[in-house]
Each structure stands twice: as C-alpha cells, then as structure tokens.
Amino acid sequence: MVELDGHPAGSVIERESRSTDRITSDLEMTLTLRRGDLEIELETVTRFVETLAHEPVSMSLRQVTGATVVEVAWTFSPRGVEARSIVGAGPATVKSEPLPAGPWLTPAAAAREMTRQVAARAPSFRFLTLDPSLGLEPVAVEMERLGDGSTLRVGERDIPTTRWRERMAGIESIVWLDAEAEVVRSEVEILGLPMALVLTDPEGAAAPRKAPELLARTLIRPDRAIEAPRATKTAIYRVRARSKELADLPSAAGQQATREGPQAFLVRVSADLPPLGPTLADSAPFLVSSTYLDHAHPRLRELLLQALDGQAETTPTERAEILRAFVHRYLQRYDLATAFVPASVVAEQKSGDCTESAVLLAALLRGAGIPSRVVDGLLYVEEFAGEREIFGYHMWTQAFVDGRWVDYDAITEGRFDATHIALGNSALDQPQGVSAASELGSAGHAPLEIEVISVERHPARMGAEVEP
C-alpha cells in the first residue's frame, strides 16, 4: 500500500517468477493525486526479463497519466539495445542504444545481493542496477544499516526488521527490511509530503483511497514579499533545506548558486542574457527527438512552420524568442488536469500548465536546430491556489544559443525574470515516460525555506502575473 500524508493513496505489487530459462521481475504501481479540485490517476507497470545466469533479455515500461499512455520496450543483444517507444495511438519510435556501461546487476541479481548483505549484517553496501522507469542508465543503490528495527505487524504476522537508510536516484529513504531483505516499510519525503510504502494483506490493499492535495502543500512562502515580480532584473536568495542536506543547485544560464553549508545555498538570479560560456561538448542529447520532446512528430513539424512563418532566417537567439512568444500565445487554456505529457499531445490539446509549455517550447527549439532542455524549479507569484506572495514549483526551458544557455519561460509575458530559482534540469532525451522527471531537482529536495536578500527591478517592466 502507498500512503501519502498518512492516507492510503495507491498500491505497489512486486512479483518475481521463474520459467525453465528466464526470471521475470514485475512491478505495478497505481497512485491517485489531487491538484486543487482535480484528481489525477497515475499508473506505472514495469517488467524486466533476464536469464537464469542474470543476463538481460528485455525490459519494458508502461505509464498512464490521465488519458496519456506511454509505452517503452527495450531489447538487449550482444551488439546493444533497441528501444521502441510509443505515445498513445501515435507512431512507434525505434532507437539503437549502446549496452549500459560498467558492472551492474539485473533486478533479480540485485535482490539476491540485498539478501546476502542483510543476512551478513553488513554495515553498508552499494551496487548498480537497472530500473525500467529510469531507463538504460544504471542507478546506484546505497544502503546504510541503522540498526535493528521494530517488529511490524502485517495482517496476522509479526515481522522482525532491520532499519536502513537507502539512497537511490538522488532520493533518500528509510526502509525496514525483513530477514530476506524484503521491504516491510519504506518512508520518504517528496516536496514536503510524507510518503510510505507499507507491506499489507489483501484487505489492507483494498482500503479506500484518499487522494492527497499536492498543490497547496508544495507552496513556499518567503520571508518577505517581492514587489512587481515580473519586472525583476536581478535577485539574491538564500535557499535552505529544513530537515536534511540540500542537494546541489545548478549554476547555469541566469543562475549562480554557491553552497553555504550542508543545508543552504546562496543563489543569484539575473534576467539579463548571461555571458558566453564553454562550448557545448555534445549537443546530441539536447537535439534528439525523444518521447517527451518529439519534434519529429508531424504535428510538431507543422507547428514549427506555423511559428516561424517567414522568420526562419533569423539568428538562433531571435528564433528562440519567437518560439517562446508563440508557445505563450498558443496554449489557450491553463489546465491542471494534465500531469506530464509529450509535446505532440500538448500541440493537439492546446492546454496545460507550466510543464506543457516547457516541453512544447523545448521540442520546437530542437525542431529549429537549437539545443534545449527543461528546468525544474520555483517561480514567485503574487497569488495562486488561494495563497498570496509565494513560490510554487515550476518548469521552464533553456536554449543553447550563441554560445550560452539562456532561460526562456513560455508562461510569462517576458522571456524571463529573476524570481525563478532552478533546482535541476534535464535533456529529457531518454525514451522512458513520466519517471524521466525524477532526473529533475525537486523530487530529491527536502522542504525548503527562502530568504529574499535583495531584488533589483526594471523600472518600466510591469508584466502580467502568471501561475506556476
């Protein structure tokens, strides 16, 4: 059972099965969330098939976000990996990838390593494995024993446990394991919301769900209000984590972040064009047509021609702003019902929130030959979701133009303002679906506090307010 904010909100079912020559690891996760008055159903189904000798055969991922279905299948061979992805009823995209580098464990082999280390009462251990929801990049699992855990009751059973700290994909959890290294309970904090995975019996799994409200819980009130936020030119903030070490904040485009200790960063943000930076060593990840940034889709090609009608010979910086302004006008309805969908879906529905505007702009930039990525962070607004003068979690776009990364926000009237604080960024170049967002910064951050140290404004720029 998945508990969010102390209430049943979903379920996770894990199975391992064997045939004469294969081991299959299956996972099914369902989750119900609420954003304002809207409920969103999320479903993730993964499968990994390996030989009895723990050689990879295939893996797959199916993600359902509202009405959008993303499916990816990877097939392993000695020569490499073929990834086949499809969004909804659209055409399949096939991509050849190299085999994952380095020594890593298949899921069944990783489960056996966990069992061995727990049985040996190891104080800590680490290994690399593949998770279909995270794609082909091996992810490190780091386990640190914290001591004997409590005896937990599951149905009619009392299960003795050991307590561990687990770090995986930038997220830290506290887990209680039984003698076979099976998870009895796991606790983590996501955007300040407590989340727990709890081993239960069939009756517990069938308990009525209560969708937690995420929107209001993630808003951050700074120590003081910011006047005319859309007119800000430069600003300096102190960003603190309330409960644990603050993950690294990026220094890129308009932001410079300097660590002030385990739990704090001093962040300077400028809305001016940044100085020239180092050459982009490898532009391929920022130009590829991927599941989310599917600029090769016919609808995106058509939209790009519409956006650049008669303006294709402009400079990259000019084209980037033309595309940003086009996306700003193109989305006709602000809609929180959409969680995270590919750019081609956004192009059809013409609605969404900041994530939809960010992926659509990033895809159009790539279609125009401009490297792009999306940024996960915070944006200050004067009013949102019934609250005033707050920072809300937000997504925008960065383009590599004229030798530098530049911020572009298609939600705001102007290109960018200094009330954006970046937490992470991603090329979104892999074929997997929603979990690609876990590459971004917000998922791994503890609840934050923001101190506004200084703000400088453009005297004549008083843009309209927006929603994060």
Image: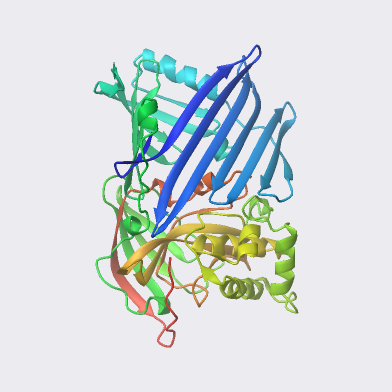
Q: Report the residue that reaches farthest toward the bottom.
A: 460
Q: Quadrant of residue 4?
A: top left
Q: Is residue 279 visible?
A: no
- Image: 189 above or below 399: above
Along the line of sight, the residue nearer the viewer: 298 or 376: 298
Residue situated in front as seen by the camera: 259 or 362: 362
Taking the image as shown, residue 454 lies to the left or right of residue 253, namely left
Q: Residue at x 43, y 46 (%)?
A: 32
Residue name at image x 29 percent, y 68 percent: 452
- Tell me the quarter of the image containing the N terminus: top left
Tell me if residue 415 comes above or below residue 10 in the rendering: below
Left or right, 148 with respect to 143, comes to left
Percent coordinates x, y for residue 218 in the rendering:
34, 56
The reply, left or right, for residue 225 in relation to residue 330 is left
Question: Looking at the picture, how far across and down is residue 40, in whole percent?
Answer: 46, 51
303 with respect to 436 (left or right): right
In percent of width and height, residue 97 lies at 70, 38
Q: Quadrant of the C terminus?
A: bottom left
Residue 181 lies in what quarter of the image? top left
